[in-house]
């Protein structure tokens, strides 16, 4: 009887261990939805016969078109009614059906990281230009460009993206844009880290958005899902494009994305400083998608001065137009 009781007690003691949450269970319990903090949304550009529609956000022209367009725009631009839409008869716009969007992408390079989001920091642009024949758009050329900003990770990293050859296709294609980001876009700089430790020299890597990928198809916009790849992991920046948030692991067990996409340039956290420490509004942003909530309040000593902000350093995000 004593032996049976001992066995029962042992089984009871082991039960909680056997029922412990797996990482995927924890991620589910956190109920973090990528759609809640997706940085881009879509705007249907209004058109008028014989006129070009010009869509501007702040001082950036997002689109010039004579034809209807489902335009990728920052989510905050819709929330704040910040888009300026005008119409023009200017002949210079006669053969325009073009659009562009920017993203500020920051990655963790491991699944159990410190979530300072500075292991790879890049500025990206997707440019979509209509190809005309006899005054009619027959195709679109899409160009994906990247500007290197910071490299806080020591691992060998590849940079890639998922996309569709054509929007109507169900299958995805992938492109590796860089086999080795340090070698290919950080000019082989052996320094570690690059622009993540404010006690070390701050140096702008490049003032250019360098084209790394091009495709021509019949779709006005090219949607992209960014990822990095190490020898053991592929980590995706959180986005809902193609339902990628349902198909790919983008959120850690602690409810943190492995990669984040912003539409505003920002001062990312310094080395080994969690984004939750640097930006107290992080969890509110994850719940709302409002970048203003995230960026309006930060701990200055815990962020890297990438935007200069009166520090006397050059703005690492600025680029030559």
Image: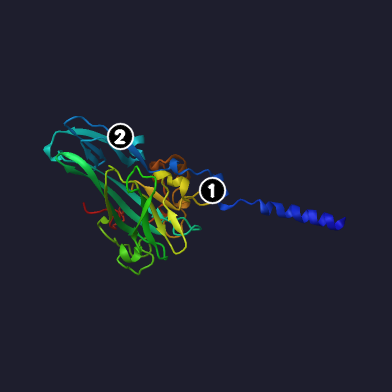
Residue 155 versus residue 211: which sits nearer the camera? 211
* Image location (x, y in percent) of residue 281: 45, 45
Mark 1 and mark 2: Cα distance apart in space:
34 Å
* Residue at the limit of the structure toward the right, as seen here: 1
* Residue at the limit of the structure toward the bottom, as seen here: 190
Disc 1: CA contacts within 10 A as few (<14), some (14-19) or many (>=20)? many
- Is residue 118 in view from this perspective? no
- Is residue 68 in view from this perspective? yes
* Residue at the limit of the structure toward the top, as seen here: 49
Which image quarter is the N terminus in?
bottom right
Identify the disc placed on residue 236: none
Which badge, 1 or 2, comes first in the chain's sequence?
Answer: 1
Determine the secondary structure under disc 1: helix
* Image location (x, y in percent) of residue 233: 46, 60
Disc 2: CA contacts within 10 A as few (<14), some (14-19) or many (>=20)? few
Q: Is residue 87 left or right of residue 256?
A: left
In this view, the mark in front (1 or 2): 2
Residue that carries the numbered disc 1 in the rendered image: 27
Residue 171 versus residue 270: which sits nearer the camera? 171
Q: Is residue 293 left or right of residue 183?
A: right
Residue at 38 percent across and 42 percent down: it is 292
* Image location (x, y in percent) of residue 217: 27, 46
Residue 130 versus residue 294: which sits nearer the camera? 130
* Image location (x, y in percent) of residue 286: 46, 44
Identify the disc placed on residue 44: 2
Q: Is residue 282 left or right of residue 321?
A: right
Determine the secondary structure under disc 2: strand
For the residues bearing labels 1 and 2, Cβ distance under 8 angstroms: no
Q: Is residue 190 above or below residue 234?
A: below
């Amino acid at each position: 009887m004593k032996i049976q009781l001992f066995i029962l007690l042992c089984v009871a003691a082991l039960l909680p261990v056997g029922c412990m949450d797996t990482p995927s269970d924890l991620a589910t319990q956190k109920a973090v939805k990528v759609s809640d903090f997706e940085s881009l949304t879509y705007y249907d550009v209004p058109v008028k016969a014989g006129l070009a529609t010009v869509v501007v956000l702040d001082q950036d022209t997002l689109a010039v078109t004579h034809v209807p367009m489902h335009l990728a725009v920052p989510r905050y631009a819709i929330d704040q009614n910040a888009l300026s839409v005008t119409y023009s008869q200017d002949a210079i716009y006669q053969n325009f059906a073009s659009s562009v969007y920017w993203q500020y992408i920051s990655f963790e390079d491991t699944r159990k990281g410190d979530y300072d989001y500075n292991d790879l920091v890049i500025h990206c642009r997707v440019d979509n230009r209509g190809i005309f024949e006899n005054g009619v758009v027959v195709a679109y050329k899409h160009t994906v460009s990247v500007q290197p900003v910071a490299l806080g990770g020591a691992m060998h990293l590849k940079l890639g993206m998922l996309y569709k050859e054509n929007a109507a296709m169900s299958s995805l294609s992938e492109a590796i844009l860089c086999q080795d980001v340090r070698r290919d876009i950080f000019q082989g700089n052996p320094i570690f880290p690059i622009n993540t430790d404010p006690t070390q020299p701050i140096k702008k890597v490049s003032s250019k958005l360098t084209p790394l990928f091009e495709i021509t198809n019949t779709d006005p916009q090219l949607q992209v899902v960014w990822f990095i790849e190490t020898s053991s992991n592929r980590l995706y920046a959180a986005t809902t494009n193609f339902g990628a948030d349902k198909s790919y692991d983008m959120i850690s067990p602690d409810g943190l994305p492995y990669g984040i996409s912003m539409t505003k340039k920002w001062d990312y956290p310094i080395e080994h400083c969690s984004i939750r420490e640097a930006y107290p509004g992080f969890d509110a942003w994850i719940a709302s998608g409002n970048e203003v909530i995230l960026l309006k309040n930060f701990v200055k000593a815990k962020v890297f001065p990438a935007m200069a902000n009166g520090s006397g350093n050059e703005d690492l995000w600025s680029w030559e137009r």
